[in-house]
Structures are given as C-alpha cells and as structure tokens.
Image (tube, helix red, strand yellow):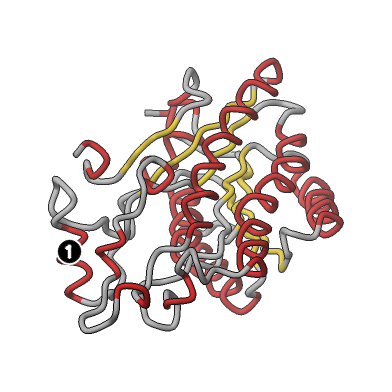
Amino acid sequence: MNQFSLVSKVIVITGAAGLLGRNHAIAVASAGGTPVLIDIDKKRLKLVTDEVFERFNVSTKFFEVDITDESLVKSCCDEVLKTFGHIDGLVNNAANNPKVEAEGITENSRLENFSIANWDADILVGLTGAFICTKYFGAAIARQGGSIVNISSDLGIIGPDQRLYEKPGVAPDKQPVKPVTYSVIKTGLIGLSRYTATYWANHKVRCNALCPGGIENGQETSFVAKLSSLIPMNRMAKQDEYHGSLIFLLSDASSYITGTTLTADGGRTAW
C-alpha cells in the first residue's frame, strides 16, 4: 500500500477553488502529499487551504494566478520551487465549465450562436492554460520525474447527449446545449497527455488523462434522473469518488502507466 503514498510529494493543482479542484486537493492531502493550489478566486482558495490544514494538518500554499498569463505561471513555478525545492506532480484541472443551470447554458451555447469570443476564452483557459502549466511545472517535474494528470471528461471520449439539456416548451433552435468548446478541450487534453507522455518519457515523467463523469451537486432532479438513465450504475458520481483514481495516477502505484486515459464514468462510455 506504500505505493499509493504521496508523502513528500508536492502536487500543483490548477482550478483548485472549484468543486473538482477542492476534491483533488483533499485527495492529495489524504495520501500525505502537499497540494499547491492555483486559481483566480483568492477567497475560495483560502477556504480550501484552511480546510486541507484543518482536516489533514498539511501546510500548503495557494497562488492567485491566471494560468493564461505565461509570465505569471512562470513566476508561480519559480516561487513553488523556491518554497519546496521540487515539484512532483501537476493536475491540469482549470476550465471554463458552463453549468446546467439556465444562466450557464443558454441558446447562445448553440453552435450557430456560439461567439468567437467565447470560443477563444474557453480554449485559452482549458487548453492553452494547460499547455502553459505543462511547459513550466512539467519541465520542473522532468528534473527528477513525476506525474502529470490532465482532467478530461467522459465527454472527451463521447459526444454530449444534448437531450439532457432540453427545456420543455422551447423551440428546437432555441434549446440550450453543451457548448462545442467543452468537447474540443476535453478531447484535446487527451492528446496533450499522449504528447507529454512520450516527450518526457526519458525524464521519468508520466502523463495521463483522467476522464470523470458528472458529479451530483445540487442539479435539478429531472437532469440527474435523465443523466443517471444513461449510466449503467444508474447514478452520478459522488464528490469523493475520484479521490482514489487521482491518487493512483499521481503515485508510484501507476508507475508503468503513461499516455493513456482512466475513465471513471460509472460505465457510461461502455454503452
């Protein structure tokens, strides 16, 4: 079981103030690692940092950083190395993720209406930001070896079922949809994982994509029911159900696994 330990490992997590990011931090700390938290939401970063310390007595650091700004990412990487002396893992988690609620996914998310500005903004965070973080934090990991985990999605493997977002009484051309950028970004992260895995293979850097399914988090009952009907396990994921998958991919327990995807979707992509 020691293979699953993250003791003495410093793991950088982007998008750490969000739902998944917070859980990634908890997972790392629960395995004895030191999570370094990055996000643009300083207030929520502080809350996650305090929670990690209170629950696991792990002192960590957080950085208010826009990962689309290369100079800020470089400075952050330098500061992490100055503080801890090494970086052992990176979790590329940050993304613009429109929610199911009406204010997040609207008719403007439809392909015909989707603006170039929204396309650029989403790609900049989800793909370019992941590249920039890989460029600097990944290069630091390559000094001694370690693991990079890109947080993709089951929708990086299959297309979104737009019926999930349909609203009764709304005309077909006005129905909200999961935007095109989500699928493109999550698929692109799988490609980035394969590239990085082969690029730094001689430096003992492993890189894999974790493809989670949806997490139940207060969505409308009708949405949860519709999505659950598409999943063989007949439910959405609980918030803590990806902890083990992440620890596995970051730890020595997955020492011969690189350039692949770990799909944790309750079997959705098996149907």
Give the residue displayed 52% in from the left and 59% down from the top: 57
Decide: is 146 above or below 55.
above
Residue placed most toward the observer, 77 or 128? 128
Mark 1 residue element: helix
Question: What residue is shown with label 1?
Answer: 226
Q: Residues within 10 Å of mark 1 (few under 14, many from 20)?
A: some
Q: Is residue 228 left or right of residue 198?
A: left
How far across and down, in percent of the image, does residue 213 sit?
33, 51
Give the residue displayed 52% in from the left and 49% down from the top: 184
- Which quadrant holds the C terminus? top left
Q: Is residue 77 left or right of residue 30?
A: right
How far across and down, in percent of the image, does residue 211 sit?
40, 43
Residue placed most toward the observer, 153 or 175? 175
Q: Is residue 145 left or right of residue 149?
A: right
Residue placed most toward the observer, 71 or 194? 194
How far across and down, in percent of the image, does residue 83 sit?
78, 51
Give the residue displayed 55% in from the left and 65% down from the top: 96
Give the residue displayed 31% in from the left and 70% down from the top: 217
Decide: is 162 above or below 209.
below
- Which quadrant holds the N terminus? top left
What is the three-letter code of the residue carrying label 1? Answer: Lys
How far across and down, in percent of the image, does residue 155 sit?
39, 48
Residue 123 found in image quarter: bottom right
Counting the numbered discs, the total is 1
